[in-house]
């Protein structure tokens, strides 16, 4: 029997598909359980995560630039102009980073919740945490050091058909935790900056230059782990979104074919037309009998007078059937 989820040929005596663990004979989705699209919000979350990583690297790149500006300002002695320029560069980089970070947090939480909710519609999915943890796990203090990893690990296993958690999930979460703790070095660097005097002498400008050089190394450590975490998360989001979208698309019904609908002719031909027999009037009151379930395949009528059907002695005359349109592909159902 073909698996409805991964199209693997399974023995009917087995309990579940060895590839996707869907019970044999079960549909790809549980009937009546709502599924949510993840492809669009996954792309938006990936863009926001990538932007956050790039803007964090921008905050690192600003430090050596300010060190060069400090050296040049020492020659002119313009301390106020130097502080204004350096401050504006750091502020612009920090604002861009914070805006991208907040957007990434919101979009990743929305994507996580949707992907977790979709697991409820997948037959064969094992025990999982409550879907509420897909949101609360990111926000509750101390819990947010563990729960997001568990939720995403479950989503990855069940969506990508893995028995064990993918290594990329561990890499993403480990790099993210290191980044969070390494950011404390940035806070210490900011405190050292506040202790610097207003530059007036060459020694003052040199102190600012030395500070920016040392800050470059301190900022670089969390930035490297942020790049690893961000890149891993983007790959996870894209792969999980693609897998869930493909599974949902596989189970979508084609929908009922109703009278009056126009469909394209199969095979790209322009002459064939598919029609469903229309109900014939039954008696003088105008009531209709149930339409026939069997479709009738009709070809376009040749030019000329329409054929007439002579009524029998015991039945009223059937109305003449108009020939199907031939000016475009397809017919009328």
Image: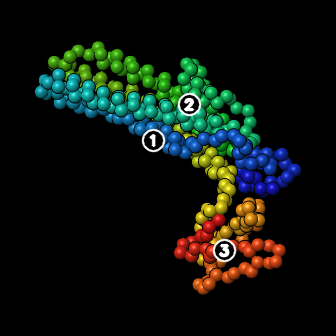
Residue toward you, 20 or 223: 20
Question: Could you tell me if the residues under marks 1 and 3 are in contact, i.e. CB atoms within 8 Å?
Answer: no
Near mark 3 (Cα within 10 A), the count class, few <14, some 14-19 or many ≥20, is few
Which numbered mark, 1 or 2, is in the foreground of this view?
A: 1
Residue toward you, 305 or 47: 305
Q: Nearer the N terminus, badge 3 or badge 2?
A: 2
Query: Which residue in the structure is indicated by mark 3?
Result: 321
Q: Is label 1 in a helix, a strand or a loop? A: helix
Q: Residue furthest left?
A: 76
The quarter of the image holding the C terminus is bottom right
Query: Which residue in the structure is indicated by mark 1?
Result: 47
Residue toward you, 207 or 261: 261
Q: Is residue 39 left or right of residue 102?
A: right
Question: Could you tell me if the residues under marks 3 and 2 are in contact, i.e. CB atoms within 8 Å?
Answer: no
Dividing the picture into quarters, in which one does residue 117 lie?
A: top right
What residue is rendered at 61% in x and 62% in y? Answer: 261
Query: Which residue in the structure is indicated by mark 2?
Result: 174
| Viewer can see residue 296 | yes
């Amino acid at each position: 029997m073909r698996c409805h989820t991964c199209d693997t040929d399974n023995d009917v005596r087995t309990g579940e598909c060895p590839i996707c663990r869907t019970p044999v004979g079960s549909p790809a989705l549980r009937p009546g359980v709502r599924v949510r699209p993840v492809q669009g919000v996954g792309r938006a979350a990936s863009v926001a995560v990538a932007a956050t990583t790039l803007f964090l690297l921008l905050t690192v790149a600003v430090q050596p630039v300010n060190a060069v500006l400090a050296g040049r300002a020492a020659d002119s002695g313009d301390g106020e102009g130097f502080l204004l320029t350096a401050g504006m560069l750091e502020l612009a980089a920090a604002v861009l980073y914070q805006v991208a970070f907040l957007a990434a947090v919101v979009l990743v939480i929305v994507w996580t919740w949707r992907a977790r909710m979709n697991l409820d519609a997948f037959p064969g999915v094992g025990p999982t945490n409550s879907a509420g943890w897909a949101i609360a796990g990111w926000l509750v203090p101390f819990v947010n050091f563990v729960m997001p990893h568990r939720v995403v690990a479950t989503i990855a296993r069940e969506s990508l058909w893995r028995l064990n958690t993918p290594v990329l999930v561990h890499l993403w979460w480990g790099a993210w935790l290191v980044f969070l703790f390494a950011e404390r070095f940035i806070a210490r660097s900011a405190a050292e900056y506040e202790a610097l005097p207003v530059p007036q002498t060459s020694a003052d400008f040199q102190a600012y230059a030395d500070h920016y050089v040392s800050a470059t190394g301190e900022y670089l450590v969390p930035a490297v782990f942020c790049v690893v975490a961000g890149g891993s998360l983007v790959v996870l989001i894209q792969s999980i979104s693609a897998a869930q979208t493909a599974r949902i698309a596989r189970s979508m019904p084609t929908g009922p074919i109703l009278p009056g609908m126009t469909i394209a002719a199969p095979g790209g031909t322009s002459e064939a037309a598919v029609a469903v027999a229309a109900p014939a009037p039954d008696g003088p009151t105008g009531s209709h009998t149930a339409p026939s379930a069997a479709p009738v395949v009709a070809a376009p009528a040749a030019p000329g007078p329409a054929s007439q059907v002579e009524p029998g002695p015991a039945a009223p005359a059937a109305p003449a059937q108009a020939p199907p349109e031939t000016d475009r592909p397809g017919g009328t159902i």
